[in-house]
Image: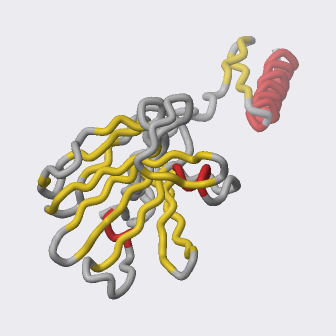
């Protein structure tokens, strides 16, 4: 009997020691069963990340492109002007850049229309050779100045809009260019120039030439 009790005591002691060793390993044996040790908590506290002042994201709008600016368009004269001198006098050669341009009186005055022809190398006034072109000189005279226009041949290049001896006001039409063609100056004096109209401006008393370009320059 004593041997049985001693044997049971020894077995119980071994069981306790074994339980202690296994418990240190993370498992506990009780009456032949294994109970898992509690797992560490995986629950984490969620926190919102905050940025220090001044670094918070801000919504930026896309840059807007400024509309292109248009440069002002300069006002151009409808004529190409060339000043030149001939036989001691000043003239203005005009090359028209607008189709069917009309030339108007620059000031009030009396109109003088004369037609010339080029016959046998000479410039003649008052002739009437129908096979040759007639070239008009259209002049407007006031008490202070006289302006003379020399366009191309009548009927083919130039259409006269006034008659000899009439009075006109500034802005009244004098003649119109109806087709491309050279001034009478090309036929009479210089075939190399491109002018469609040649203009001269003088004082009425004949004391000197004036600048005719002031009546044709852009405003």
Q: Quadrant of residue 102?
A: top left
Q: Position of residue 87 (x, y in %)?
A: 57, 77
Left or right relative to 31: residue 3: right
Relative to 165, say whether 159 is above or below.
above
Report the colour scheme: secondary structure
Q: Nearer the viewer, residue 114 or 72?
A: 114
Name the residue located 64 percent from the left edge and 56 percent from the top edge: 193
Q: Residue furthest bottom?
A: 207
Name the residue located 34 percent from the left edge and 76 percent from the top edge: 202
Q: Quadrant of residue 112?
A: bottom left
Q: Nearer the viewer, residue 27 or 59?
A: 59
Q: Position of residue 71 (x, y in %)?
A: 42, 56
**From this viewpoint, is residue 63 visible?**
no
Q: Position of residue 218 (x, y in %)?
A: 35, 62
Left or right relative to 102: residue 126: right
Quadrant of the drawing holding the N terminus: top right
Instruction: Count the marks.
Output: 0
Name the residue located 67 percent from the left edge and 21 percent from the top edge: 36
Quadrant of the drawing holding the C terminus: bottom left
Q: Residue furthest top?
A: 32
Q: Nearer the viewer, residue 60 or 80?
A: 80
Relative to 127, say whether 50 is above or below.
below
Q: Position of residue 190 (x, y in %)?
A: 65, 58
Relative to 187, say whether 6 is above or below.
above
Q: Quadrant of residue 132?
A: top right
**From this viewpoint, is residue 39 visible?**
yes
Relative to 140, say whether 16 is above or below.
above
Name the residue located 17 percent from the left edge and 69 percent from the top edge: 142
Q: Nearer the viewer, residue 111 or 179?
A: 111
Left or right relative to 37: residue 92: left
């Amino acid at each position: 009997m004593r041997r049985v009790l001693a044997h049971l005591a020894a077995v119980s002691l071994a069981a306790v020691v074994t339980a202690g060793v296994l418990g240190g390993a993370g498992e506990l044996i009780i009456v032949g069963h294994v109970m898992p040790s509690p797992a560490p908590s995986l629950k984490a506290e969620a926190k919102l990340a905050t940025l220090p002042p001044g670094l918070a994201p801000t919504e930026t709008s896309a840059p807007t492109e400024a509309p292109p600016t248009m440069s002002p368009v300069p006002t151009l004269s409808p004529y190409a002007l060339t000043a030149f001198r001939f036989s001691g006098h000043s003239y203005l050669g005009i090359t028209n850049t607008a189709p069917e341009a009309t030339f108007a009186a620059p000031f009030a005055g009396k109109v003088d229309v004369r037609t010339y022809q080029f016959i046998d190398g000479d410039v003649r006034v008052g002739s009437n050779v129908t096979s040759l072109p007639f070239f008009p000189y259209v002049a407007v005279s006031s008490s202070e100045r006289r302006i003379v226009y020399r366009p191309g041949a009548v009927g083919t290049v130039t259409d006269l809009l006034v008659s000899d001896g009439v009075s006109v006001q500034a802005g009244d039409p004098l003649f119109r260019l109806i087709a491309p063609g050279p001034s009478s100056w090309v036929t009479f004096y210089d075939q190399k120039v491109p002018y469609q109209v040649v203009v001269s401006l003088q004082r009425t008393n004949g004391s000197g030439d004036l600048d005719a370009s002031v009546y044709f320059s852009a405003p």
